[in-house]
Image (spheres, rainbow, N blue to C red):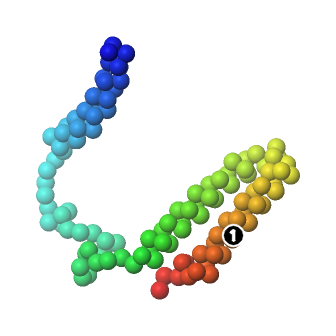
């Protein structure tokens, strides 16, 4: 049982830390409610219509596609840093990667996933 004591202490500290942090923050923060502070804010304009309207699925589809392509582009940075050491094999593998990426982009484009209308 003594072997598990450090793990138990770690779990207790990990569970207590966020709770203690939130309680301390609530105690020491200034509480000055103001109607201007409590109003909803969207790009400096007053909200028009119902705030909880449904959002088109295309919005989320475009967001997910952006994240996917953005993460794939991040993979190019280490390749660019070590381009000279990777030689021809590195170039061929990156060309293959970019080809697959472009095929995915073309597929999304042809399916109409990038159109916002």
Question: Horizontal placement of 69 versus 116: left or right?
Answer: right
Toward which corner of the image does residue 15 lie, by quadrant? top left
The foreground one among 90 and 31 is: 90
Residue 101 percent across, percent down from the top left: 67, 65
- Residue at the spot of label 1: 102
> Quarter of the image holding residue 71?
bottom right
Is 4 above or below relative to 110? above
Q: Residue at x 18, y 64 (%)?
A: 38
Q: Residue furthest bottom?
A: 117
At 30% from the left edge and 23% from the top edge, which residue is drawn? 9
Residue 33: image quadrant is: bottom left
The answer to whether any part of residue 49 appears in the image is: yes
Is 6 located above or below residue 117 in the figure?
above
User: In x, y percent, where is residue 43?
Assistant: 34, 72
Q: Position of residue 12 (x, y in %)?
A: 27, 28
Q: Is residue 47 visible?
A: no
Q: Secondary structure at mark 1?
A: helix
Residue, x 14% and y 61% (percent of image)?
A: 34
Quadrant of the drawing holding the N terminus: top left
At x 14%, y 66%, the residue is 35
């Amino acid at each position: 049982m003594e072997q598990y004591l450090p793990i138990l202490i770690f779990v207790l500290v990990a569970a207590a830390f966020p709770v203690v942090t939130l309680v301390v923050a609530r105690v020491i923060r200034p509480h000055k409610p103001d109607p201007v502070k409590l109003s909803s804010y969207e790009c400096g304009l007053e909200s028009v219509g119902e705030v909880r309207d449904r959002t088109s699925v295309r919005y989320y589809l475009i967001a997910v596609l952006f994240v996917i392509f953005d993460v794939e582009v991040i993979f190019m940075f280490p390749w660019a840093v070590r381009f000279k050491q990777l030689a021809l094999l590195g170039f061929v593998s990156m060309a293959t990667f970019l080809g697959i990426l472009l095929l995915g982009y073309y597929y999304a484009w042809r399916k109409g996933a990038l159109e916002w209308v």
